[in-house]
Image (spheres, rainbow, N blue to C red):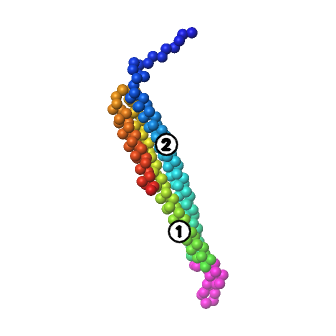
Amino acid sequence: MAEIEIHHEPGHSADPAGKTVGFLVGVIGVLLAAVTICAHRAHTAAVIHRTEANDQWAYYQAKKIRENTVSTAADVLAALAPTNAKGEKTEKATQAMQKLQSQREKFSKDAEGIQDKAKEKDHETTQDEALALRYDLGEGLLELGLVLSSLYFLGRQKFFPLMGTIAALAGVATALSVFLLTG
């Protein structure tokens, strides 16, 4: 059975810069993974808050439709309610109109509270989307740093890991700027 020989480039094992760049690439990769996870979580939170806001807006719409329906019923009842000999609405018609008015006020009040909750969820969505954008930008810069640093192994030029480090530091700073928004 023939032995397999592995040929190494001359001086490859004696390249201390290559070891340093390899370590740098590993660190950037770990930071990239962490920022990517944060970005995914921020996007998920934005989607959840958007869904909750949409649910609240649908509930608000339902309350407003009920309010409008009751209001229309009250108007129809007022126009068509039977009257007595003096031209006054009968007791039964008056009670029905008061009940409809009470329901209309309740639906209107409920709708205001629901609208406030929907606006709050919209605001949370906007905040989450801003955080996700920062994480996405940080992620992109870290990916750029990873690629630039890795190019050292093809060209053996120290320019690549230098630019990669700058891009990675900008990515970390961008991702950490999220704490300025939340603080």
Look at label 1 and name its amino acid: Glu
Residue at the far top: name it: 1
Q: Quadrant of residue 110?
A: bottom right
Q: Is residue 55 above or below residue 87?
A: above
Confirm whether residue 80 shows in the render. no
Secondary structure at badge 1 equals helix
Q: Earlier in the sequence, mark 2 or mark 1?
A: 2
| Viewer-nearest residue: 34 or 40 | 34
Q: Quick one: SS at disc 2?
A: helix
Q: How far across and how far down the image is residue 103, in percent? A: 60, 73
Asked whether 81 falls inside the magenta stretch, the response is yes
Query: Around disc 1, counting alpha carbons within 10 Å, would you say few (fewer than 14), some (14 to 19), or many (20 or more)?
Result: some
Residue visible at 60% across and 76% down?
Answer: 102
Picture residue at 55% right of the left edge, 71% below the top: 109
**How many callouts does the rendering have?**
2
Quadrant where the image shows the C terminus: bottom left
**Residue at position x 44%, y 33% in the image:** 23
Label 1 belongs to which residue? 112
Looking at numbered disc 2 in the image, what kind of residue is underneath it?
Answer: Ala
| Residue 136 drawn at (x, y percent) | 44, 45
Magenta span includes 135: no
> Is residue 152 shown to the viewer in this render?
yes
Q: Which residue is mark 2?
A: 34
Could you give the CA–CA distance between mark 2 and mark 1, rounded to whole angstroms? 41 Å
**Where does the image place residue 7, in percent across and percent down from the top left?**
45, 16
Q: Residue furthest bottom?
A: 86
Mark 2 or mark 1, whichever is nearer to me:
2
Up/down of 21 relative to 103, above or below: above
Residue at the farthest right position: 92
The magenta segment? 77-96
